[in-house]
Amino acid sequence: MKLQCQVEVVNRLHSSLSIKSNGRYLKSTLALAKQPKLKKDEETEYVILHFSTINKTGIKYKVSSVKQLFVKCIEKGLSTVRFEEPPVDLCIKSEATQLKCFLRLLKSCLSGNCKDVKLDNISNISVTHKDIAPTKMVIKDRSQFPDKGFPRTLEFLHIIGLKLHNFRRDILLLRNLVVLDLSDNEIEKIPPEFGRLPNLAELILVNNHLGKQSKVDWRWLLGPQIIKKLKLLDLSGNSIKLLPKSIWKLQRLVTLKVDNNNLIKLPSTLGRLGSLRYLSLSKNELETLPCSLMQCPLEHIDICYNKFQMSNNKTINMEHSPWEIYVGSLAHLVSKVVLKHKIFYAPNLIPWTLVDFLDNSHMCVCGAPVVNDKTHLYKEFDLKSFFNVVVFDSCRNSSVCFECYFCSPKCFSKVIKSS
Ligand SMILES: [Zn+2]
């Protein structure tokens, strides 16, 4: 029997000499096997073979020298097998059911109660490439797709340049996936279930057709699991016209690349991405940036080749007096408090119309939430005064027109006066 697992080998002599183990679990296969009998009347000897990524020929441990089995955390898929000789502990992490099955078999070998158990001879056991569960796969040709579907152990999957039109649904089964690169395909749609991948940290969708449809369904990007882990999102080269307003929900996002699209405007909520450090916006049709961006702790912004225009502080929607900013409805006032204190809200707690209202709120130049967007104006600011690295093309400078919203007449007059 073979067990796919992760193993850390701890030498007890080291610990008595206070040499610390490196605490590294290696991807491994443990195999339980029979030692061939040399003489007929000899008792069958059983062994555990430990194959790992650094030892593919396997290390042999005699079952008869097992001193103790630690199974307290077996339900979590953790166990330790302690050997008398050599004085090592094999600390095992595996899927709980398989681990239990393996240990049950080991116990019956230990007790000698295993006449019915069929085990391979040691000479028949070898670890094929497949046994060491693969974690990375790069597919650049259709013939490289595995016949039996993707191994569930994959953490890195790259399917590049195949002109795939449809998103492969078997990707949705890869719960361990950390990095997914689907560059240079022709994918137009990603199913909403994609948002449930629990470990995805990097998503690269460069040069696909995501923006081709008139109304893009972004649910896959804003799913309950993906928003908790995603750190890098590259949507360059997808003919996207608008990003979803709720993109701010990707609270772990550090890098956002949307180069070479057809973006005219960015969502005013973008500044709510509290972890964003790198933003690349080159080769779009942007004329302004949302003022919420000033609140983003960006280190690097690339604004090359856009259509930013010089503003003459043109104010739109000024038929309302700025004093109206003060007088809001009860919903406005409550929303401000909820946003300011970052109180948790969800559609199962409050009416979805309110959720929508809160999700789409703007941000003042000072960073305070703005739910009343009656007054906003365009004003130019130098990006260099906010961010460390600003990349801009030679035919313009680093000043860009911002679409500004205001939480109070005070903020409003501050911006007006600074012009
Ligand atoms: Zn303000």
Image (tube, helix red, strand yellow):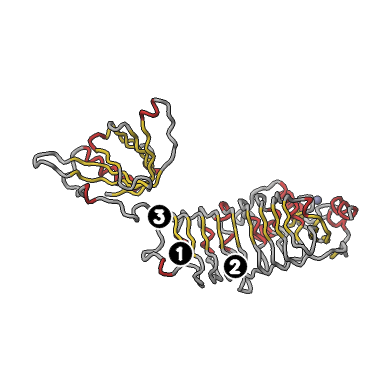
Q: Is label 2 in a helix, a strand or a loop?
A: loop
Asked if the residue under mark 1 is in contact with the one under mark 2, i.e. CB atoms within 8 Å, the reply is no
Identify the residue at image location x=50%, y=65%.
160
User: In this image, 50 relative to 353: left or right?
Assistant: left
**Foreground tag (2 vs 3):** 3
Q: Is label 1 in a helix, a strand or a loop?
A: strand
Of the 4 image quadrants, the one containing the C terminus is bottom right
Query: Is 260 situated above or below 296?
Result: below
Front one among 257 and 53: 53
**Foreground tag (2 vs 1):** 1
User: In this image, 319 relative to 169: left or right?
Assistant: right
Q: Is label 3 in a helix, a strand or a loop?
A: loop
Q: Quadrant of residue 209?
A: bottom right
Identify the residue at image location x=44%, y=59%.
137
> Which numbered dot is residue 217?
2
Identify the residue at image location x=27%, y=32%.
85
Q: Which residue is mark 1?
A: 139
> Which numbered dot is residue 58?
none
Q: Earlier in the sequence, mark 2 or mark 3?
A: 3
Q: Earlier in the sequence, mark 2 or mark 1?
A: 1
Q: Residues within 10 Å of mark 2 (few under 14, many from 20)?
A: some
Q: Is residue 330 visible?
A: no
Q: Amino acid at mark 1?
A: Ile
Q: Amino acid at mark 2?
A: Asp
Task: Tell me the CA gap for discs 2 and 1.
Answer: 27 Å
Provide residue 170's location: percent of width, then percent of height: 44, 64
Q: Which residue is mark 3?
A: 134
Q: Amino acid at mark 3?
A: Pro
Q: Earlier in the sequence, mark 1 or mark 3?
A: 3
